[in-house]
Image (cartoon, rainbow, N blue to C red):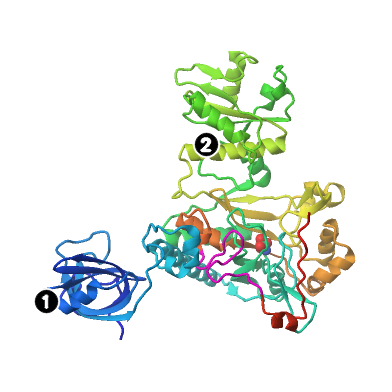
């Protein structure tokens, strides 16, 4: 036996026992007569003590231990006089009688402490050392616990986990595919799944009724905005259900996860908001509902008074920042700079300060009487002490700008607490999205999403107005999951594909197998997929999904530890019947 206990296990009650531990040397402290070593493993840290008086040789040996040496020690558990209340083993130490060096270690390139001195790139190069750090390990343990709880919930609700293939034909989810050449079929390629979408629908045709899978998906996207080329979905599908059944089943999962991994009680049913309302009042299809500050439409109140910025605007929207009436010139200037940043894109910011003493000061005093301003304040429900911030412009862009401003104010006012969770469903998404540059419709969710039955007639007359039976789970301003009720009839599916610009031949070539399956008794079905990495990151209070993944890629899609992607040997290319010809960079 290498060890009798782990480094996180011993307590005062064990005092007097002779034990054996194995682990890594976190650090050594040499205090002349005594040498202390912190021994670490996955479970914790235990203090070892070596005494010059009792065994000088052993103590000398201990002094020479380097950081991250792997050792095995045997000794006596003793009560510590100087207890460390910060660690669970802090009441005891081990008076070592035998020390075995199992392996030495090079000096690690950064400190393996909670707050490491290693930069991002360096830690990723030595990810196996980074993974020894407690905060990183805790994220992976949380991830594991969540996966276990997900499986427990689904198993209790009659879902079965079915693995779907990784080498497939393309599944459109709106991103670029990663492709894999086939040696046995020269000139032909597999695609890696952007999601198991078509397979889970086929499992419904097969009568499996309730499916889930914790599954890797692959999308070749630009990696700004906290994405990874391979990521994990909790993928789900159900038969003989309507949208209501889906929302109920999966908000149950959300409640279960919060309860059993964070001990937080989530009240059901979750709030639901239509896509139209989310856009109108929060300027986003993923509103952060940890705080209020919804938008007020003040177009009619402010237009037509000779202030050209307002008179020419299609829409004028306001948010009320509580308790901010005493913002200084400098603070208002910095907010103005914020909205004028190219990423936000506003031309300027208009404010009304409604001071605690009832006095009113605004940047539009010249154009409006105090009475008119008071009407605006009343209509946006501002109270004394508030600051009203106003943006005018075309509606679509102004809503987006107000959304950025709202989030910025939420940050400034400390209203986006990571320990507060505000989940909601956003429902009734549009089926289609018009793209100006290509002059065609795209599926807002994906081409297998069913229109709302009451909107089907609009498919012919005004396709942009058709709403879908599609829904997103949003928590704290992040899309955590999304899904839809599916089309399950080949005629409607064909119609949808033709709206999306697929010729009958293309539709047949890409999705013929699905349409064929639909002719063999496809049940009504629908589903959802959650971004597992993102969910873990939210639960762990992290800013990035990277720290929830054991071996992530960097922003250029590289694994800097094993340096991939990389070139392959000529023989491999030959076997694949491929020749690489680099296209010259376009001028
Ligand atoms: N396949 C979809 C996605 O990856 C989810 C779904 O519709 O179930 O977003």
Residue furthest to the left in view is 53
The part of the image, by quadrant, that contains residue 470 is bottom right
Q: Along the horizontal axis of the image, is 567 left or right of 320?
A: right
Labelled disc at residue 167? none
The part of the image, by quadrant, that contains residue 243 is bottom right
Could you tell me if residue 308 is visible in this image? yes
Circle 2 — which element?
A: helix
> In the image, residue 489 lies at what x, y percent?
80, 66
Q: Along the horizontal axis of the image, is 107 left or right of 27?
A: right
> In the image, residue 232 lies at what x, y percent?
58, 66
Q: Residue at x 14, y 78 (%)?
A: 55
Q: Residue at x 57, y 25 (%)?
A: 351
What residue is shown with label 2?
Answer: 409
Q: Is residue 449 above or below residue 363?
A: below
Image quarter hosting the N terminus: bottom left
Is 140 a magenta residue? no
Q: Along the horizontal axis of the image, is 372 left or right of 462?
A: left
The part of the image, by quadrant, that contains residue 219 is bottom right
Q: Along the horizontal axis of the image, is 49 left or right of 119?
A: left
Is 552 a magenta residue? yes
> In the image, residue 222 lies at what x, y percent?
66, 57
Q: Is residue 3 above or below residue 501?
A: below
Q: Is residue 480 above or below residue 361?
A: below
- Distance from Cα at disc 1 to Cα at disc 2: 64 Å
Instruction: Report the magenta residues as a range.
Output: 549-567
Residue nearest the observer in this picture, 275 or 357? 357
Circle 1 — which element?
A: loop
Mark 2 sits near ligand 1, with its Cβ under 8 Å away: no
Q: Nearer the viewer, mark 1 or mark 2?
A: 1
Residue furthest to the bottom in view is 1
What residue is shown with label 1?
Answer: 54
């Amino acid at each position: 036996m290498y060890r009798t206990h782990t480094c996180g296990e011993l307590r005062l009650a064990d005092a007097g026992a002779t034990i054996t531990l194995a682990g890594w040397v976190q650090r050594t402290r040499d205090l002349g007569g005594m040498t202390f070593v912190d021994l670490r493993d996955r479970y914790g840290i235990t203090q070892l003590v070596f005494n010059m008086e009792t065994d000088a040789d052993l103590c000398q040996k201990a002094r020479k231990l380097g950081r991250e040496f792997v050792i095995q020690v045997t000794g006596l558990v003793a009560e510590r006089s100087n207890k460390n209340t910060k660690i669970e083993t802090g009441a005891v130490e081990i008076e070592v009688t035998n020390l075995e060096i199992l392996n030495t270690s090079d000096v690690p390139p950064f400190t393996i402490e909670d707050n490491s001195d290693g930069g991002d790139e360096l830690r990723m190069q030595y990810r196996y050392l980074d993974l020894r750090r407690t905060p990183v390990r805790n994220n992976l343990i949380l991830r594991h616990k969540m996966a276990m709880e997900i499986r427990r919930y689904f198993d209790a609700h009659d879902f079965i986990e079915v693995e779907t293939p990784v080498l497939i034909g393309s599944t459109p989810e709106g991103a670029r595919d990663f492709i894999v050449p086939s040696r046995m079929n020269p000139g032909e390629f597999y695609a890696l799944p952007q999601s198991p979408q078509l397979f889970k629908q086929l499992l419904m045709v097969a009568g499996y009724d309730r499916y889930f899978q914790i599954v890797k998906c692959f999308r070749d996207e630009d990696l700004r905005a906290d994405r990874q080329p391979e990521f994990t979905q909790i993928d789900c599908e159900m038969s003989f259900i309507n949208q209501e059944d889906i929302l109920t089943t999966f908000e149950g999962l959300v409640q279960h996860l919060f309860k059993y991994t964070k001990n937080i009680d989530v009240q059901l049913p979750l709030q639901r908001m239509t896509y139209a309302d989310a856009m109108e009042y929060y300027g986003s299809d993923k509103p952060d509902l940890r705080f209020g500050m919804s938008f007020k439409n003040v177009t009619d109140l402010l237009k037509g008074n000779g202030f050209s910025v307002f008179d020419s605007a299609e829409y004028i929207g306001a948010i009320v920042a509580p308790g901010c009436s005493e913002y200084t010139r400098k603070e208002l200037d910095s907010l103005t700079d914020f909205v004028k940043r190219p990423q936000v894109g506003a031309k300027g910011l208009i404010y009304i300060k409604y001071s605690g003493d009832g006095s009113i000061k605004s940047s539009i005093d010249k154009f409006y009487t105090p009475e008119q301003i008071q009407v605006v304040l009343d209509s946006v429900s501002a109270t004394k002490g508030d600051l009203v911030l106003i943006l005018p412009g075309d509606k679509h862009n102004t809503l987006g700008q107000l959304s950025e401003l709202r989030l910025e104010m939420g940050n400034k006012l400390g209203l986006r607490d990571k320990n507060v969770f505000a989940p909601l469903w956003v429902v009734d998404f549009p089926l289609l999205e018009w793209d100006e540059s290509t002059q065609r419709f795209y599926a807002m969710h994906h081409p297998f999403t069913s229109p709302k039955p009451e909107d089907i007639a609009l498919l012919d007359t005004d396709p942009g107005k058709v709403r879908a039976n599609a829904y997103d789970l949003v928590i704290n301003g992040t899309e955590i999951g999304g899904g839809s009720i599916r089309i399950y009839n080949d005629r409607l599916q064909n119609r949808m594909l033709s709206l999306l610009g697929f010729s009958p031949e293309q539709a047949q070539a890409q999705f013929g197998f699905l349409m064929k399956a639909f002719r063999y008794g496809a049940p009504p079905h629908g589903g959802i997929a959650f971004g597992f990495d993102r969910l873990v990151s939210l639960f762990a209070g992290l800013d990035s999904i990277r720290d929830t993944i054991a071996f992530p890629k960097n922003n250029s899609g590289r694994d800097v530890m094993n340096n991939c992607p990389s070139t392959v040997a000529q023989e491999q290319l030959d076997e694949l019947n491929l020749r690489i010809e680099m296209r010259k960079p376009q001028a």
